[in-house]
Image (cartoon, rainbow, N blue to C red):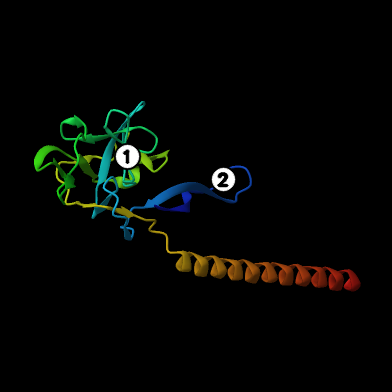
Amino acid sequence: KAEYLNYIMNDSGKSSSNNMPSYSEKLSTDFSQGTLQKTDNTMDFALQGEGFFVIQTERGLAYTRKGDFTLNANNELVTKSGDFVMGKSGKISLSGRNINVDESGIIKIDDNQVDQLKIVNFENPQMLIHAGEGLFKDQGNGIIQKDSNSKVINGSLEISNVNAIKEMIQMIDMQRTFETYQKLIHAIDDQDKLSTGKIGKVG
């Protein structure tokens, strides 16, 4: 997911040391839907709409939209790092040949339902904390919602929601703005030098 660094002016407006404006940094995440890419891999899952897969890690529960899962030696559904993908009944075991997952996340093996992917949504996803490898942690501020309108797309992955062209245009625009201010600062500096020289001659 795309991340943006924002600078927020503190309530006081100025720092106590040099009377310059005081700012704090805040990293925000854009959780908007990324493009879905078809892979035809049975172990790949994408979410259409809001929501997160629930992952059991050694440090507790985590949440992700990165659905490139696999099977471990015990035929349990896990992430590439080996963390367990959770179902409504706990860890998901997939022992069988014909695995089918519908849009609601219900998992069937040989036409027999074995489990359902556990998917949750948050009222305040911006309160989630990055835990690396596409995982997010909730410290209780995200507020889990009971219902999720997500659709599970099996055999597809959600790719980055970063628009490379848009980001390139913004970067060029920022660079030109920086150059403009730089020229303005040099012009003001030249004017100061000129003014100082004239005052010296009058004296």
Q: Name the amino acid, label 2.
A: Ser
Q: Quadrant of residue 138?
A: top left
| Picture residue at 32% right of the left edge, 39% below the top | 70
Q: Residues within 10 Å of mark 1 (few under 14, many from 20)?
A: some
Q: Is residue 75 visible?
A: yes
Q: Nearer the viewer, residue 41 or 126?
A: 41
Q: Position of residue 139 (x, y in %)?
A: 32, 33
39 left or right, relative to 130: left
Q: Which residue is mark 1?
A: 70
- Three-letter amino acid code of the residue under disc 1: Thr
Q: Which label sits in the foreground, 1 or 2?
A: 1
Mark 1 lies on a secondary structure that is strand
Please identify the residue farthest to the front as the structure is shown. 97
Q: Is residue 165 above or below residue 112?
A: below
* Callout 1 touching callout 2 (CB < 8 Å): no
- Depicted 194 relative to depicted 81: above or below: below
Task: Determine whether the residue tagged by mark 2 lies in a helix, strand or loop.
Answer: loop
Q: Which residue is mark 2?
A: 15
Residue 60 at x, y percent in the picture: 32, 28
Residue at the image point whose x is 62% and y is 66% from the top: 178
Of residues 195 and 190, the one nearer the viewer is 190
